[in-house]
Image: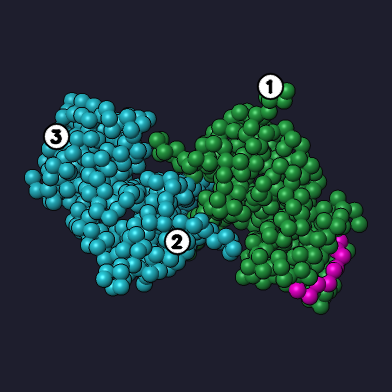
Chain colours: A cyan, B green
Amino acid sequence: MNERLTISVDAMGGDAAPEMVVEGVDIASASHPAIHFLLFGDERRLRPLLDRLPKARAASTLRHTEEVVGNDAKPSVALRVARGSSMRLAIEAVRAGEAGAVVSAGNTGALMAMAKFVFKTLPGITRPAIAAVWPSRRGDVLMLDLGANVECDAQNLVQFAVMGEVIARVMLGKTRPTIGLLNVGSEDLKGVDAVREAAAVLRASPLAECFQGFVEGNDITKGVVDVVVTDGFTGNVAIKTAEGTVHMIVHALGEGFRSSLAAKLGYLLARPAFERFRSWIDPRRYNGAVLVGLNGITVKSHGGTDAIGFAHALGVAIDMLANRFNEKIKEELELIDLKGEKTSPAQAV
Amino acid sequence: MNERLTISVDAMGGDAAPEMVVEGVDIASASHPAIHFLLFGDERRLRPLLDRLPKARAASTLRHTEEVVGNDAKPSVALRVARGSSMRLAIEAVRAGEAGAVVSAGNTGALMAMAKFVFKTLPGITRPAIAAVWPSRRGDVLMLDLGANVECDAQNLVQFAVMGEVIARVMLGKTRPTIGLLNVGSEDLKGVDAVREAAAVLRASPLAECFQGFVEGNDITKGVVDVVVTDGFTGNVAIKTAEGTVHMIVHALGEGFRSSLAAKLGYLLARPAFERFRSWIDPRRYNGAVLVGLNGITVKSHGGTDAIGFAHALGVAIDMLANRFNEKIKEELELIDLKGEKTSPAQAV
């Protein structure tokens, strides 16, 4: 197996696992015929699933594991106890060089704790972050941190900006992505100290040209910048509020279209437009958050997703791998002084 | 003039002031015929507007002011310099007992700074907060703080919960509103210290029965609780992200319905349902944020709103006044130990 063409998969993570995982592998193997999948999980459940899906079977190697990390397992406990779990062994396969990236739809906290323990952080990165793509009026936007760190200092935020810029190049295909720091609008108070300090460091950094300053919550969906940087508490609340708002609106629209015969007929006529809209905001299209800052590519799929969503998360891992994501971050990190301490010639003397 | 039936209005605040303000007063005076409006602003501009709107003219008294607080004015500067402004004098009228509440669509920071300086905070309240209503799948939800305080400690959050419960009774008409603290979902890290501490205080308080614990961003629009309590940074980002998401979706839907002849026809057929949906998420219906915790009822209208939205903000002030909002908060505050220090019988000895 070629590490650069192999994705390690936790086949037991997610609400509808292992069925949706194997079906997701089947879908992904159709669009990525060169990729091999290393599936970790219960052989007794996985084998019959693979037997029904010849594309998935041809593209996969199965590794039997007995243990599964529970959805409610505390990350610290999972790290200590679940050493033989599908999640842990899928991560270990990347460290061992058998695969180039790992994908799991399991418990986020456990995945982060295990990946951090096994991979360690990249040189120069203090804390990993969770990054994901979100729709905007001007194309997709990348946001981070979405919940790995509830409190962040200026240095963390600057590191997130550096990593975000690289991910936006890989995932959004932008040559020079713009970056904004999420903040509030009240003039006198403008943001917390960490946000203000991070802005000062970025303005004096090689990223200064990409850095557009502060953005507010409504700027995310306006697509004012390509990369929105924030702490994990704010980012988690923002993305979940946005998700909730989309659900609420789609639900209300559905009810409206069912409210009368004329509305039903109207829906049928406008259906292609409505379907385009629905596929545009389809959360499955945005499935696959990247745990960035680790010495190994780790992609977290939504636990509640289906096979199509899981296939998308596999696609994200394949993209990161094909684009040499971590190598690019390392190169970028060497160019920027993340501590905000300028090593001027005078100091060097 | 009866203080309990008079609303003091900053007629010069807002992007489309004073026209939209006077038109808003006209609309509000039709639905609230017992209410009197005290308008502060430039007589040369206000008089001709009132002459064209007999309902507004009959319900209003005009007070001439020369100065206007600029939209970009720093709150600290506005507080020092703009003592003769329409905003400042509209606030002073409430302190002088000429009106029972003040409404402004001007600069939020300046309004908060001036109202805080003139009214002072309620006994027992350390910091005022900004509260507003938002739609959910199970009826309207009240959120606070939406941006008055970028950093909050546990005591602030507990005070917001107390005030939020009272506002929800007044604005949402709930007899026993439920309360949730906004948090993130990662199990081991569950929230920042202040959020965890506030939860402990609320669980041991007379509000324990109403307090439903932590809620996440997606729970806001699910309507899991009636009152969502958070710090001003997170609350501001959340509400603006939600607003931005609504805008993005309505825009995309509009484009979809214009994309083909069939879709246009479909829109016409489904129009009543679509119009109901639009009026449900109409930001004007949610216009009118309350600056709570001050010794004077202060309502902030969106600066970019129109006459209908401004009339709604006037309606919020009228509701607060009619329901003796501040008296109720004071009563509630006497029942709850906001410092989280239990005055047990033993200590009292």
Q: Where's residue A11, x and y in %?
A: 23, 35
SS for callout 2: helix
x 61%, y 47%: residue: B144
Residue at mark 1 to residue at mark 3: CA–CA distance:
66 Å
B194 is higher (above) or lower (below) than A185: above
Of the residues shown, which amino acid type is indicated by label 3?
Answer: Leu
* Pointer 3 or 2: first along the chain: 3
Residue bearing mark 1: B346
Residue ranking furthest to the bottom: B44
Label 1 – label 2 distance at C-alpha: 48 Å
Asked whether residue B64 is drawn in magenta, I would say: yes
With respect to residue B183, does B269 lie above or below?
Answer: below
Type of amino acid under label 2 = Glu
SS at mark 1? helix
Q: In the figure, is residue A122 to the left or right of B216?
A: left
Task: From the image, state whether disc 1 or disc 2 is nearer to you.
Answer: 1
Q: Are marks 1 and 3 in contact (CB under 8 Å)?
A: no
- Residue A13 x/y as whole percent: 29, 35
Over which residues does the magenta segment extend? B59-67
Task: Determine the image quadrant of residue B41.
Answer: bottom right
Q: Is residue B205 visible?
A: yes
